[in-house]
């Protein structure tokens, strides 16, 4: 079966003040269905840029992105948008919840964007909130939630449209140690029990230990070695790999 997400020789340049800065320089990898893949890299290594290219928040300068074996470049703009909306849920580092909508309304957004009616999926959305330990937070507004709760709402929102892939950008970066651990356990469970595929980008070694496979992004390239395999990877192995790569 084709990987659920794949990149081939992906390039991204940014033009700033007449200079062309390469951020991604030939990145190729595959996320298999049901896999939990972690891409680690230092600040500025291109992690967020990579997720933006996969989710359609930005367009590549070269190379290909394939979703479920289909090259996005071969699609019309409209097909590309639909393919991304159906396939990808995005968990942002800073949650990106809409402040004037309560938890249920935030959760309904991906459905509304897909042209579906959130009211008709209430039971499903409530099930998701239960699942994420947010059953009694439905009517809360984002400012009435803790950081960990906001992040769990944003995970629920990324799942709400039924997308099989979760892209997570440093999802514990703004959480306490304990809230971060809860979020990581939730992501692991979503792979193990629901068969979702997770692509996590982070510079947090602890978070990397939850993944099935850890790749390292250095200066816009994914070095072939080392590749670490988990889950349940000792955190020392991650530290060792980072030290060996000088990051
Ligand atoms: N829109 C943009 N225009 C110009 N340069 C950009 C733009 N977006 C990102 N960059 C540059 O690209 C590089 C990679 O940025 P990116 O946000 O992908 O890094 P990151 O690995 O996510 O870092 P962090 O861990 O700090 O979040 C940085 O040097 C950044 O300044
Ligand atoms: Mg980033």
Image: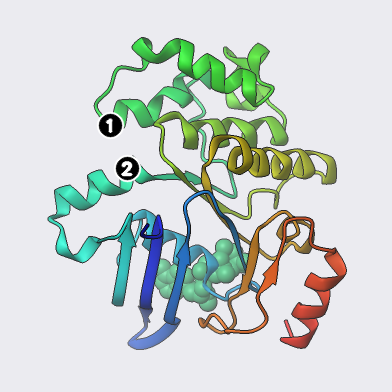
Judge whether 90 appears above or below 108 on screen. Answer: below
- Counting residues from the start of the chain, the first of labels 2 and 1 encountered is 2
Residue 42 occupies quadrant: bottom right
| Residue for point 77% across, 64% down | 205
Q: Is mark 1 within 8 Å of ligand 2?
A: no
| Residue for point 30% across, 17% down | 117
Mark 2 is surrounded, within 10 Å at the Cα level, by few (under 14), some (14 to 19) or many (20 or more) other residues, namely: many
Judge whether 187 appears above or below 213 on screen. Answer: above
Image location (x, y in percent) of residue 51: 46, 60
Give whichever of 236, 104 is nearer the camera: 236
Label 1 secondary element: loop
Image quarter in which the C terminus is found: bottom right
Apparent side of residue 71 relative to residue 50 in the rendered image (left or right): left
Q: Is residue 224 visible?
A: yes
Q: Is residue 60 visible?
A: no
Image location (x, y in percent) of residue 190: 60, 38
Q: Are marks 2 and 1 in contact (CB under 8 Å)?
A: yes
| Residue for point 39% across, 31% down | 161
User: Could you tell me how far apart the alpha carbons at marks 2 and 1 are, in whole angstroms?
Assistant: 7 Å
Image quarter in which the N terminus is found: bottom left
Disc number for residue 114? 1
Judge whether 198 appears above or below 46 on screen. Answer: above
Residue that badge 2 annotates? 85
Label 2 secondary element: helix
Image location (x, y in percent) of residue 103: 54, 21
Judge whether 131 appears above or below 182 on screen. Answer: above
Q: Residue furthest left?
A: 76
Disc number for residue 62? none
Give whichever of 25, 144 is nearer the camera: 25
The way the protein has been coloured in the rendering is rainbow
């Amino acid at each position: 079966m084709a990987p659920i997400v794949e990149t081939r020789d992906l390039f991204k340049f940014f033009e700033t003040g007449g200079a062309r800065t390469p951020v991604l320089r030939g990145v190729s990898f595959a996320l298999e269905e049901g896999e939990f893949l972690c891409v680690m890299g230092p600040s500025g290594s291109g992690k967020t840029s990579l997720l933006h290219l996969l989710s359609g928040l930005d367009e590549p300068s070269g190379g290909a992105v394939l979703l479920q074996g289909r090259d996005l470049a071969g699609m019309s703009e409209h097909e590309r948008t639909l393919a991304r909306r159906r396939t990808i849920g995005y968990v942002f580092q800073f949650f990106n919840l809409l402040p004037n909508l309560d938890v249920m309304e935030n959760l309904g957004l991906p459905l509304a964007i897909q042209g579906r009616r959130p009211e008709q999926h209430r039971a499903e959305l409530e099930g998701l909130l239960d699942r994420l330990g947010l059953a009694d937070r439905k009517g809360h507004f984002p400012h009435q939630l803790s950081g960990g709760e906001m992040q769990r709402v944003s995970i629920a929102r990324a799942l709400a449209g039924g997308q099989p892939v979760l892209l997570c950008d440093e999802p514990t970066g703004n959480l306490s140690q304990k809230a971060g651990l809860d979020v990581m356990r939730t992501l692991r469970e979503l792979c193990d029990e629901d068969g979702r595929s997770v692509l996590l980008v982070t510079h947090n070694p602890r978070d990397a230990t939850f993944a099935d496979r850890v790749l390292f992004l250095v200066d816009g390239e994914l070095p072939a070695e080392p590749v670490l395999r988990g889950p349940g990877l000792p955190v020392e192995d991650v530290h060792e790999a980072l030290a060996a790569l000088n990051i």
